[in-house]
Image: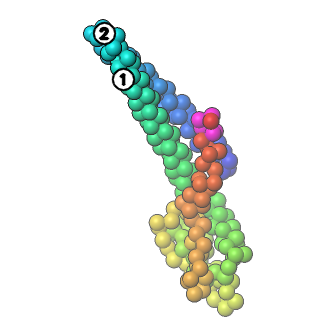
Amino acid sequence: MGLENVKREILEKARKEAAEITSAAQAEAKAIMRAAEKQMQNYEQLIDEDVDRSVEQMRRRELASAELELQKQVLAAKNELIEDVFSQATRKLGQLGDKRREAHVKALLDLVRKEMNVAVVQCNSRDARFLEGSTGNDGSGGKLKVIKNDSISGGIVAESPDRKLKVDYGYESVLGQTKSKVLSDVARLLFGK
């Protein structure tokens, strides 16, 4: 299953969940509006014309407050859904087969070697075996030091020989950077705005 298929599957699921959440939030908003309307009608029967203006103002405030609360709930649901999309993507990447993981780790190492000399690489225990025996590109001809770090679900964190430079190509970091770049596109795909 390609990354595009995974992405498409996750986005489709997210769209369906967004529609369900939005529908439920709209139903709740209608119930809130009906309750507010009923309360306002009772007030109008008990007061005279001078008080009618005050009631109308109260009604507007109540409706505006209900609409604001609905908007907050919908926004929170949308943000939660977007977070879920990226969490699912991280999970799916973590479940890739060994061949795909090996290809990713080696491709990421090649990429970071173009950016800097690499002497140390951190990766999770599952991926460490794919880098065992690799050499650094710092000119010493020495073996690449591989540090197992299971807080990284996949990908690598590469360090320069003096360990002052670090490039983080861990799945979480890459998805985090991607998220900040495509957040508006994802929201538009999920929610049509």
Residue placed at 38% from the left, 25% from the top?
62
Residue placed at 29% from the left, 11% from the top?
47
- How far apart marks 2 and 1 lie (CA) works out to 15 Å
Question: Residue 24 in the image: x percent, y percent?
Answer: 45, 27
Residue that protrudes farthest toward the front in the picture: 50
The label shown at residue 48 is: 2
Give the magenta part as a residue range.
Answer: 188-192
Residue placed at 69% from the left, 67% from the top?
107
Q: Main secondary structure of the magenta part?
A: helix
In-image side of 83 versus 9 (left or right): left
Residue placed at 54% from the left, 30% from the top?
19
Question: Residue 43 in the image: x percent, y percent?
Answer: 30, 14
Q: Amino acid at mark 2?
A: Asp
Residue that protrudes farthest toward the left in the picture: 46
In-image side of 110 versus 154 (left or right): right
Q: Where on the picture, by quarter, is residue 100?
A: bottom right
Question: Residue 59 in the image: x percent, y percent?
Answer: 38, 21
Q: Earlier in the sequence, mark 2 or mark 1?
A: 2
Judge by depth and name the residue closer to the eye, 31 or 22.
31
Q: Is residue 159 magenta?
A: no
Q: Amino acid at mark 1?
A: Met
Q: Which of the two discs, 2 and 1, sits closer to the camera?
A: 2
In-image side of 188 versus 21 (left or right): right
Judge by depth and name the residue closer to the eye, 33 or 16.
33
SS for callout 2: loop
Residue 77 shows in this picture: no
Residue matched to label 1: 58
